Image: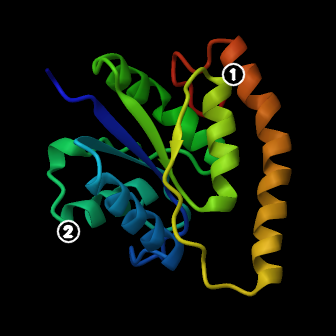
Amino acid sequence: MTRATHFVLILGCRVLPDGTPSSALRRRVEAALRHAAALPAVRFVPVGGARGHAPAEALVIERMLLAAGVPASAILPSPLGLTTIESLRDCWPLLERALASEPGAALHVCTDGYHALRCRTILALWGRRTRVAAAPRPQLPSYRLLLLQLRDRAALLKDVPLAVFWRATGKLRHGTPGA
């Protein structure tokens, strides 16, 4: 009997120009590693593009996973996309191929708790059920956390129609960047 593979999708976030991960990115990667430790067979899918002069978020996550001892063969980076929905759309063809090649595979979304609803909603609209592997709550004042939650809910209102449109027009199947 073969063990089902668990794909852990790690959503990128801020990287400094010198390639240093933000504290939020470190929390997400650490949470993904802790979550994966309890799973039988894991492949990591780091996502996120480059902003300004900083390296792509997915490549910084990949570097962190390698430093933690994850073999390169267990990492499927997708270094495109500047927003959550763009990053998810740009990794979609890779993710669909990987999930289709692994019968019984499960998809886990690793991000901050306030961000998980938006990610999981987009993926559900595209036909994928997910499990959540939330990063620990950031040590921020309550008003900052509230602002992050409100910003993410507003982005959800923008992303839902776009996710439906991309699925209806076949833009997911082709991984059409910038559409």
Q: Position of residue 155 (x, y in %)?
A: 79, 49
The residue type indicated by label 1 comes to Trp
Screen quadrant of the N terminus? top left
The crowd level at tag 1 (other Cα within 10 Å; few <14, some 14-19, many 20+) is some
Residue at 82 percent across and 29 percent down: it is 161
The mark lying in front, picked from 2 and 1, is 2
Q: Mark on residue 91?
A: none
Q: Height in image: 120 above or below 46?
A: above
Residue at 28 percent across and 21 percent down: it is 102
Q: Position of residue 10 (x, y in %)?
A: 45, 52
In screen coordinates, is 135 left or right of 58?
right
Q: Mark on residue 67?
A: 2
Residue sticking out furthest to the front:
1
Q: Earlier in the sequence, mark 2 or mark 1?
A: 2
The residue type indicated by label 2 comes to Ala
Q: Height in image: 115 above or below 5?
A: below
Gap in angstroms between the C-alphas marked 2 and 1:
36 Å
Q: Height in image: 129 above or below 63?
A: above
Picture colour scheme: rainbow
Q: Quadrant of residue 13?
A: bottom right
Q: Quadrant of residue 93?
A: top left
Numbered disc 2: secondary structure: helix
In screen coordinates, is 86 left or right of 17?
right
In screen coordinates, is 136 left or right of 151?
left
Label 1 belongs to which residue?
166
The crowd level at tag 2 (other Cα within 10 Å; few <14, some 14-19, many 20+) is few
Residue at 59 percent across and 20 percent down: it is 127
Q: Position of residue 66 (x, y in %)?
A: 20, 61
Residue at 64 percent across and 28 percent down: it is 124
Numbered disc 1: secondary structure: helix
- Find out whether the residues at labels 2 and 1 contact each other: C-beta distance under 8 Å: no
Screen quadrant of the C terminus? top right
